[in-house]
Every structure is written in C-alpha cells, then in structure tokens.
Amino acid sequence: MEGILHGYTVNDPTWFYLSLLLIVAVFFRFNRVWSLRNLDLILLLSISPGLLIADESPGFGFAWLFVGTGLLLLRLFFDSFFKRRPPLEQNLNVHGLTFLCLAAFGFQVGNIIHEPPPDSSVETVRGAQEILRMRDASDGKEKDKNAEAGPTTRLLATPMVPTSKLVASGQNSIGPDGFEELAVHIFAVLAHLAAAFGLVMIGRLHFGGNQHGIAMATLYLLLPCTAYDVAQVNHVLPASLIVWAFVAYRRPMVSGSLLGLACGSMFFPVFLLPLWAVFYGRRGALKFGLALAIVGAVVLGSFVFTSVDVQSFVQQTRGSINWSALQFRGSDANGFWSTHNAAYRWPVVAGFIVMLIALTVLPFKKNLEHLISHSTAIIVGTQLWYPQQGGAYLLWYLPLMLMVVFRPRLTQLVPPEAEETAENGRAAGEPATRAVAMSGASGVRRFR
C-alpha cells in the first residue's frame, strides 16, 4: 500500500483493533445482545489474538489457539440443536456492505502486494514451472520442507507462471527471478477472490438472497486472521475449492471434481469425502466417486510429463504427499504439540476418528445444514491434532465457519436423490391427494 499511499503502514496489531471496531459496528446485534450471532462473532474474534501472541510467546499463543479451536468445535457440535434461526440483518444495508466489501478486498490486495510471499507459496510456483518445462522433478533430491502444497496446487498455478513472466517483462524494476513473487501475488489475489465470490454465490443461491452472501464475504475480508496470512495460497486455495463445492452441491460430478482438487492441494479435505458420499446417497455417491477418480487420473497424468522413467514417476507420486503432517512423533515446527508430549496426541486423534465416524453416519438422512456444519467441524477438528502449528491455520475453515454463522434454516435443501424421490412421490400422489382433499371438503360442508 505504500506505493499507492505514501507513508501508509498498518501493522498486525493495529489492523486487529481497526477491524474489531468495524466488525462490531456492522455485524454485532446491539438489540439482541444474547444471540447466537454475537456469540459466533466473539469466538471468531477471540482466536485472532492467539496468532499475534504466538509470534512473541509461542507456548502461550498456541495454547490460546488450541483452546479457541476447541471452543469453536464445541459450538459446531451444538449447531443442529439451534432450531430457531431468525433472519438477522446487518447494521448496514446491502449497498453499504458492498462498498465495504470492495474496500476490504482492495486493502487485502495491497497487503498481498506489499508483503513478501511465504516460502511455501514460492515453492509451489517453482513446482508449476517444472511442470511447464516438463522437467524431471524428482532428480534424487529430498522433498523441500517448504513444499507443503499438493500436486493440484502446482497444476492450478501453471497459468500464473506465463502471466507473471509477461507482466514482469514490461517492468524494468522486476528482476529475472521476480516473476515468482509476482505469480504468488496473482495466485493469492485470485484465491481470495474465489473464496469471497463463492460466499456471495452461496448466499444468493442457497441462503435466500444477496444480503447474507455479501455479509459473509465482507466479514471474511475484514477478519484479522485473513490479513495475517493473506499470501498463504496453499491454505486459501483448498478452502475456496470447498466453498465452490457447496455452491454446486446439487451436481455430484462438479462437487466431486472440486473436492478432488482440494484433496490434491492439501491433506485435510480427504476427511470430508466419506461425509459427502453418505450425503449424496447411492446414485449420487457413484457420480461423486467417478469425479474423484477422474481428478486423480489427471493429477497422476501430470507426473508423467515430469518423469523420465517409472522410478521417477513412483518417487514423485510418493513425494506429492506431505507425510510429516501425519507423523505421531514430536514436530520440529512451532505449534501446540511441539511443547507437549506427543503421546497425548493419541487420545486426541482417537477422539477425532470417533467424531469423524459419528458426523459421517449421523443423522442418516442429511440436508445442507448437516453438510455445512459437519464439514466445518471435521476441518476444525484436524487443527487439534495437527503437529505443525495446529490451530494456527484458520484459513482452512474460516469460509465454512462463516457459512455456519450466517445460514438460515436449510432443512428444505436435501441431496439431489432425495429431491427426485420427493418429486416422484408428489407426482404419483397428486391425484389421490386432490381427491382426498375434495372429499374432505365436501364432508366438512355436509356436516356443517
């Protein structure tokens, strides 16, 4: 932002206070203080200070994040018990929300351009460049510790490489290797744009209007945790893909493809696949699984272009998974489990598996309410046992959590197979229902 406004600087603590005042002024319900909306805002805002504290005091900061994540998970457990979801409008009309959303997005774009990109995002762009060059990516070297993203992130980053090179060629101030940072900036802007616009579409298509969608997108861009990790493409992209899977939930092939791409970008969306398969039912699950298989075949095909032999193909396939994320020994990275005995993670992992099974099978007949809250709870639950900075990756679940916060009652939004069954039942029973209604009406007239 200094290139646009000379002398303009906003550090992380300052942005926390400014965004706090904006969020409270726009979204806090002053006429209903004891409301679920206010509780959700307090929980979301209370986690962000943990990210700031973790920089100065990692032990206390990650403990703060661990407790805050646990409270969010507890709130998600009770989401289905809140039967009354009255429509709560924001303290700003739709036009004002739209202006604030665009202004917040402009601020985040300036923040992306101003901050140096993370090493993991730069490594993703380098992997995309290797795919375009069709160069052997294994070459006997160990997997870079910063390469936390999966193969689909590198595939989706391939268009950014020629675009950034084209832009860099016309800028004398950008060095020969400066296109990597520029590609990360472009990729990060598009990822956040996809997440925000996906929230707008969910409000428009599933939540009954544009007001909820614009409110979700605005709050997503205003929250401090978004600004703190705004350039983390590897964390924003899978969340954006999951959001669009919800937008297209009525089409199992489309949602399966998007979730397949999300699973190939990072590990945690894999835990959502059983839940979505059960949600769709027998026929929908077949289409959903077919889409996943197609995406997997495309990803494996990308390894063929960067492998010189079978051994290289096998090494790249095995190296595409960050196995350190699933290790049970102590982690070298900062995090809650780096300062605690790794043996205590076993009960947490066991509890997560029990929770995963329960949320997948219960209730047997699910609607969109269950799918949103259960998917969010599963992703939030992974933060409690993740060995590398567990609890700090709020962008994994932030868009989904906002969907839980703003959603109305969605009991009528059922899987496509259930909709077809209901429509067939109504079509078959319509004459009988009409006859019964007519006879009942005549009986009423007769007894009067």
Image (cartoon, grey):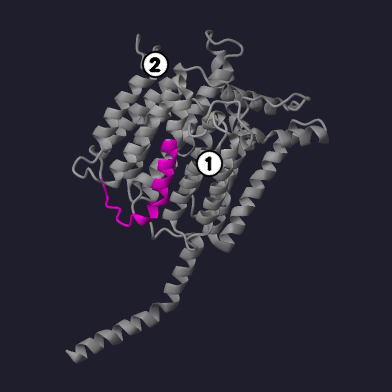
Name the N-terminal-most of marks 2 and 1: 2
> Where on the picture, by quarter, is residue 309?
top right
The image position of residue 310, as x and y in percent, is 82, 36
Residue 211 appears in the figure: no
Residue 264 horizontal/vertical position (percent): 62, 39
Residue 384: x and y in percent read 51, 39
Q: Residue at x 50, y 17 (%)?
A: 116
- Per the rendered image, the range of residues in magenta is 67-88
- Position of 95 relative to 295 (above/below): above
Q: Residue at x 70, y 27 (%)?
A: 143
Structural distance between the alpha carbons of marks 2 and 1: 35 Å
Image disc number at residue 382:
1
The amino acid type, in three-letter code, at marker 1 is Thr
**Label 1 secondary element:** helix
What predominant SS class does the magenta segment belong to?
Answer: helix
Contact flag, marks 2 and 1 (Cβ < 8 Å)? no
- Numbered badge on residue 69: none
Residue ID for mark 2? 1
Q: Residues within 10 Å of mark 1 (few under 14, many from 20)?
A: many
In this view, 217 is above or below 60? below
Which amino acid, mark 2? Met
- In the image, taking residue 77 as reference, residue 281 lies left or right, namely right
